[in-house]
Image (cartoon, grey):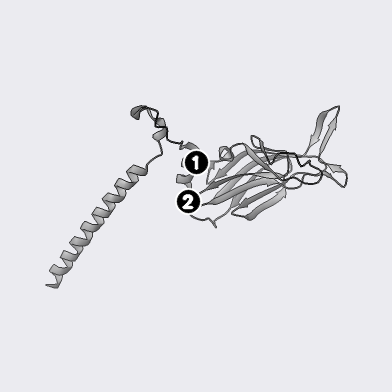
Amino acid sequence: MKITIDIEGTFCNTWPNLVVEVNNQIIYSNYIINSKIIELQFDNLRQTGNRFVIGMDNKSFGKKGIWDTKTKNNQIIEDKTLTIRSIKLDDVECITLMNNIFHIQRVDKQPTYFPDKVQSQGVINYNGYFTFSFDLPLYNSLINLKYKKPMDNEISYFSNYTKVFHYEEEKEVINDIYNILKEIDEKFSNKRAKIRNS
C-alpha cells in the first residue's frame, strides 16, 4: 500500500515531529520543516482491522520551563503545530475518515481536566493523533467507509439513497448462483469422467 501525506509544520523552539503508524508499527518519525510531501510504502496488512495513526509527539508543555506555544498580549505569536492537507492510501484521499477527532496525549504540565478528544479539521495542536481503520480489499473498504450510510427504512423504496453500497442481499443471490453453477459443473465433470472410463 502506498501512503502519500501532504503536511505543513510550524516552528516554536523546534520543529514538530510527525509520527505515522500502521498496525502498531512506526513507519515514519521525523521533523516536518515547513511543507512536505511524504511517500511511504507499507505492505504488512491484515484482511480486517488495519489501523492508521498520524500524530505529533514532541510538543513541550512546560517541561524544564519550555512551552512550545508563545503568546504576547494574549495572542499566539509562535506555536508548534502540524496541518495535514492530504492523506492518500493507494491514491485515494482519506482525510475525511479521521472524522475531525483528535486524540490528545497529555504531557508535562497540561491540566488533568483537559479533554481526551477534541474536534480538529486536520490540525495537530497537541501531542496525540488522528486515527482510522480499514480492511482489505482496500478500495472496497475505503468506498464503504467514505460513502456507505446507515440504512434509513423511513425513506420510500425508490427514493432511498441510503441503500447505496448495501449489497448484502445481492451478494447472497450471487453466492447462491455460484454454488448452483459449481454443483452443475461437478455433476457434468463426473458424467464426463464416467463416459471416458467406459
Q: Position of residue 169 (x, y in %)?
A: 34, 43
Give left or right: position of 50 versus 66.
left
Q: Quadrant of residue 193?
A: bottom left
How many labels, in total? 2
Q: Residue at x 37, y 41 (%)?
A: 167
Q: Residue beneath label 1, please?
A: 145
- Which of 88/110 is in front? 110
Disc 1 element: helix
Q: Residue at x 49, y 43 (%)?
A: 142
Q: Name the residue type under label 2.
A: Leu
Q: Position of residue 143 (x, y in %)?
A: 47, 41
Going from N to C along the chain, the mark reached first, 2 or 1, is: 2
Residue projecting furthest to the front: 113
Disc 2 element: loop
Residue 34 image label: none
Q: Position of residue 73 (x, y in %)?
A: 86, 27
- Which of 180/152 is in front? 152
- Image quadrant containing the C terminus: bottom left
Q: Residue at x 71, y 50 (%)?
A: 30
**Callout 2: 10 Å neighbours few (<14), some, many (20+)?**
some
Q: Position of residue 139 (x, y in %)?
A: 47, 45
Q: Residue at x 40, y 39 (%)?
A: 166
Q: Quadrant of residue 80?
A: top right
Residue 136 image label: 2
Give left or right: position of 50 versus 176.
right
Q: Name the residue type under label 1.
A: Leu
**Callout 1: 10 Å neighbours few (<14), some, many (20+)?**
some
Residue projecting furthest to the bottom: 197
